[in-house]
Amino acid sequence: MSHGDADTGHSTPKSTFYDQGRFGRLFPALPPFAADTPIIRDALLELGAQGGPMDAADDLTDPITLITDPAKSANNPDNPGLTAGFTFFGQFLDHDMTFDPTSSLARRQDPEAIRNFRIPALDLDSVYGGGPGVSPQLYDRTVDGGRTTMLTEEIPGSGAVSVDGSVRRDLPRNSQLVALTGDPRNDENLIVSQLHLALLRLHNVVITDVKAELGAGFTADEIFAEAQRIVRWHYQWLILHEFLPATVGASTADDVLINGRKHYKWRNDPFIPVEFSVAAYRFGHSQVRPSYRANFGTSATDPTQQFFALIFDPAAADPADPADLRGGVRAPRRFIDWQTFFDFGDGRVRQNKKIDTTLSSVLFNLMGQPPGTATSLASRNLLRALTMSVPSGQRVAKAMNLPELAPGDLADVEDLSLHLRTPLWFYLLREADVIASGEHLGPVGGRIVAEVLVGLIEGDRQSYLRQDPDWTPTYGSNDEFTIVDLLTTAGVVATIA
């Protein structure tokens, strides 16, 4: 089996000054889980191969029956605690935290040598860019001279009308349909692009409210700054009070918020730990369903009138309106009705897939990868752990003084000699499955994710935790603000009888 072109020569050293760059390590003294050798690379490629142990073996012939017939996706069991949209909200957060266009699967790398083109914070710079003065292409020049309001565009065509008659909208795009965003990855698929749109529209709602509250005595720049603060703080609240407990378990989230971080610390400014970015936070890849109902089309009751599609399909031939949920396209049917993805109490929501060591089969044939490189997402994740010298799950658990998985919990990778020194990403997926029944991350993975997300917000001098830790949301209800509140306030939810 091909294993790529690894650099020859000495391994890149791991600096002990782990917080000098924007990437670093929680446990700089731990060795990598394995030496980067052809034998190890082949073992990882075998583990992550299409049709291999991590492939859920979904029947991809019909995206509708993948949803309506459980036998078509028997290895992707429902997660009762997380609805389908949280996978994509998690993806949005990832893009808000980091952007590294330079990393390679072929060469060994020191995380501190990698430049993070995104400030490591949860501050919506993927939405706002550099603000109206630096990123004017993101702002509507017909309102306040482009100083306050985010730009969005209607989707043309009769098919872009929801079942309630409302016209649907899209991200702003240039003449070649390239999305105008603070992060191009937020147009990777239709769901995350429409989440980005929801944040744009939430900001515009808040702008209107701030103008009404402040009156005429404030400048456009002051109005924008106040609206941006309000949106950011609601977003951070949502992360800490809904996304985090659902993802790591309420007890872990509460422990980190109340008792503080034990492992994620820095001297100057927050950084992104490799144990988080290359392993723990990639749990979302295990949650992806092979197909989704994007919208209800012209009928809330007739599936043949609705838009069902695989999340990705290389065989989807029409570039103007492919029969999958890829991004980068504007067409009448390419919008989201959120009732499939989040729970509005109408019985239409779909649950996420459980967190375990199987991935939906669509993720084993990724589009747009460089020639000669792995197209399996599982293989790419496993190889990245090797090139980034990530420690084993067992060593990380021991360093955190948390229980290790028993060798029997990893018996299926014993033939690949990965059961005693297991790649951290695979280990944390298995930990979630064994200890938390796949409903949320286990103690090691959950602790890493909780400490980093809480730490990034605590490390942001403009966050609500730093500026006003007793603040509660003004949107939503009963001092709470959920993803359903965000979408409803943004006005992107169709009324479906």
Image: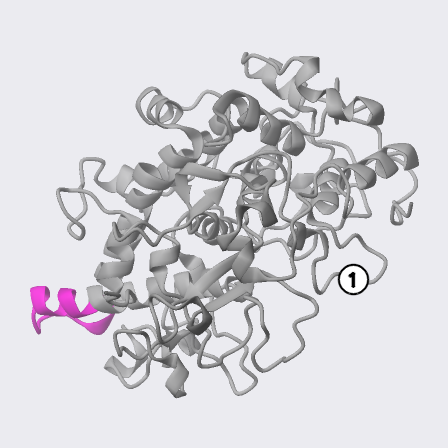
Residue 209 on the magenta segment: yes
Residue 305 drawn above or below residue 277: below
- Mark 1 surroundings: few (<14), some (14-19) or many (≥20) residues within 10 A: few
Q: Is residue 35 left or right of residue 131?
A: right
Q: Is residue 13 left or right of residue 24?
A: right
In percent of width and height, residue 2 lies at 90, 48
Secondary structure state at the residue bearing disc 1: loop
State the image coordinates of residue 31 (x, y, percent, origin top left). 74, 23
Apparent side of residue 28 relative to residue 400 in the rendered image (left or right) = right
- Quadrant containing the N terminus is top right
On the image, numbered disc 1 is attached to which residue?
A: 370
In-front residue for pair 328/395: 328
Amino acid type of the residue that numbered disc 1 sits on in the rendered structure: Pro
Residue at 50% across, 83% down: 174
- The boundaries of the magenta stretch are 207-221
Q: Residue at x 53, y 87 (%)?
A: 175
Q: Quadrant of residue 147?
A: bottom left
User: Is 418 in front, or is 196?
Assistant: 418
**x and y percentages locating residue 137 in the rendered image:** 43, 78
Asked if residue 406 lies in the magenta stretch, the reply is no
In the displayed structure, would residue 148 be above or below residue 176?
Answer: above
Where's residue 131, x and y in %?
38, 67
Rendered view: 108 above or below 135: above
Residue 265 visible in rendering: no
Quarter of the figure that contains the C terminus:
bottom left
- Secondary structure mainly formed by the magenta segment: helix
- Residue in front for this viewpoint, 190 or 214: 190
